[in-house]
Structures are given as C-alpha cells and as structure tokens.
Amino acid sequence: QIDGIGGGNPVTSKVAIVGPASIKGADVDYLFAQVRVDQQIVDMSPNCGNMLAAVGPFAIEAGLVPVQGPTTLIRIHNVNTGKLIEAEVPTPNGSVSYLGDAAIDGVPGSAAPIALTFMDAAGARTGQLFPTGKPNEVIDG
C-alpha cells in the first residue's frame, strides 16, 4: 500500500510482492498487483513506480540484499513486464536512510530520493518501441 491498508481507494489499493530473484542478473523479484475496490479483482498486468520505489529499501530491510556503501544499487526483476530496473537506495552508515526532501505532488511529506533506472523498458507491453510501429500517429483526428 502507498499509505495504510487500502481505504477503498484505487490509489492506495496496491500490493508489492518481493522475493529472491528468479533470473540471473537480478537481486530480487517484484510482482505488482492492483486491487480493484469496486470488484473482486486483482490485476497483475500493470506496473507502479511508487510501489517500485519501495522495493529497494524493503529488500535491504528484509535481508534480501546487503548494504554496499553510502548508496546501494539493487537490480529488480519486474515479474509483470519481465524487465529489469535499477534502484539506487541511500544507505549511509550501513542502513537505509528514509529522511530527505524528495517530494511527490499529491503525496504528503518528503523522504530520501530513490533513483530508478528502467533497463531496456521499451516494448514491455507491445513488443516494440512505438505501439503502432509509427513514431507519429493521428488518432481519431
């Protein structure tokens, strides 16, 4: 959950399932699930960057990944898309730092920044960089 346990709102009804990596080159697996609040459906086809940003700190806290220095780089295998994401987690003094001034519009407070780098993310859903195969497209216009 982004903040709390659901609350009947799609923005906060999200689940991140994190575990040991199932593929070479990754440190952990991450499976995202969007819980529908109006139906008994759990959708595992989308992705969520906000939940993804929590995977690195969780992996360290859960002992899945050791601290590497002032910053810890974690390679996350997104099970939903099959793609890799690198998360840079601030780990000064040998532990995750949560204090910082990074802010997200619409989310109260601030925290330490978690830099995410999406590796070869193009085509995760469609198999190609441009979903229609064209760099420019006029739709219904």
Image (tube, helix red, strand yellow):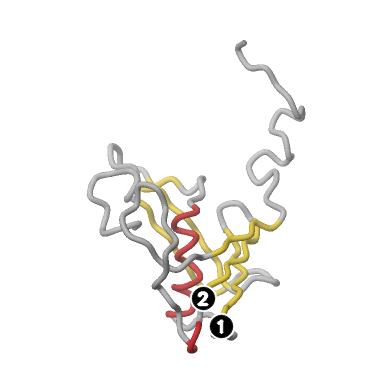
Q: How far apart are marks 1 and 2 (CA)?
A: 6 Å
The C terminus sits in image quarter: top right
In the image, what residue occupies the spot 72% across and 34% down? 130
Task: Classify mark 1: residues with Cα within 10 Å, few (<14), some (14-19) or many (20+).
Answer: some
Image quadrant where one finds the N terminus: bottom left
Residue underneath mark 2? 90
Decide if residue 5 is on the left or right side of residue 64.
left
The image shows residue 137 at horizontal and vertical percentages of 70, 21
Residue 133 location (% of width, % of height)? 76, 30
Depth check, front residue: 131 or 86: 86
Residue found 64% across the figure and 71% down from its top: 26
Q: Which residue is drawn at 57% across and 70% down?
A: 88
Circles 1 and 2: CB atoms closer than 8 Å: yes
The residue most toward the top is 141
Q: Quadrant of residue 3?
A: bottom left
The foreground one among 40 and 129 is 129
Give percent across and percent down for residue 8. Answer: 24, 45
Q: Position of residue 29 (x, y in %)?
A: 55, 67
Outermost residue toward the front?
101
**Residue sitting at x 43%, y 45%:** 43
Q: Residue 70 carries which label?
A: 1
Which type of secondary structure does the marked residue at label 2 adopt? Answer: strand
Q: On the picture, is 12 further left or further right than 112? A: left
